[in-house]
Amino acid sequence: MEWFVNTSVGGAIKGLQAVTNVRRFVSLKAVAPSQIPGLPSNREFPIGFIAFGLECAEGAQVTVNVHLSQAAPTNAEWYFYNQVTRDVSVYSSATFSTTRTMVTLSLRDGGIGDADGEANGVIIDPSGYGVPIVPVTEGAGDDNCFISTAAGGSAPHILGAETSLMLLLLMALGAALFVRKVRK
């Protein structure tokens, strides 16, 4: 039994596959990160979350595979949103495949991976992967970008923008005087 959903971010298709002890899926929807309160501020969630519901025996341990349309980055971790406590945490029972295109989730009705926390034969699981936010490096986008690029890369910025501008003006003035002297 397999279900598919377009994620809320990036349009990636995710497939959901029952592996063990799942009677049937009852719901599957994409959830935008903006709809999940309490996300860690140092993480981004490139494809958002998926929320699925399934039926199983009360208190059962089940296994579900989530198929990703693209490989998750190597630094990605699977996160679970607990709707009762409103906590977002790393999912300790999630395992990425070696190709990182599949995540195996081990869930327990009323326990880990079940957002309602009740052993009632229904598991509700909102989850998705997050990656660390890459900080913007100092100096990115400053006025020396052209000079840096022309020099063949990101040369260290020893001089400030004002000093660099003065140097360029002096060089232009020197060139103009040289040309004037050569013409005489």
Image (cartoon, grey):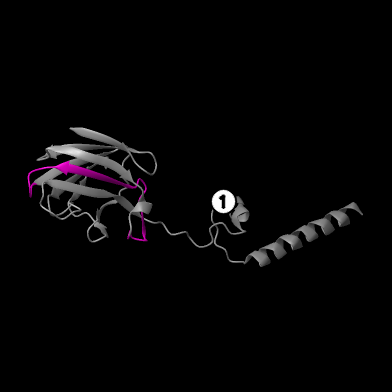
Which quadrant of the figure contains the N terminus?
Answer: top left
Q: Is residue 163 left or right of residue 152?
A: right
Identify which residue, 85 or 1, lies in the foreground. 85
Residue drawn at 62 percent across, 55 percent down: 147
Residue drawn at 67 percent across, 66 percent down: 162
Identify which residue, 46 or 82, lies in the foreground. 82
Residue 85 x/y as whole percent? 23, 61
Q: Is residue 130 left or right of residue 116?
A: right
User: In which quarter of the view is residue 165 placed?
Assistant: bottom right
User: In which quarter of the view is residue 22 placed?
Assistant: top left
- Toward the top, the furthest residue is 1
* Observer able to see residue 149: yes
Against 174, is 128 above or below?
above
Residue drawn at 19 percent across, 36 percent down: 17
Residue drawn at 58 percent across, 66 percent down: 158
Residue 15 x/y as whole percent? 26, 36
Residue stretch in magenta: 38-60
Q: Is residue 153 left or right of residue 60?
A: right
Q: Is residue 56 left or right of residue 82?
A: left
Residue 138 x/y as whole percent? 50, 63
Which secondary structure lies at badge 1?
loop
Amino acid at the residue labelled 1: Gly
Pointer 1: what residue?
152
Against 102, is 133 above or below?
below
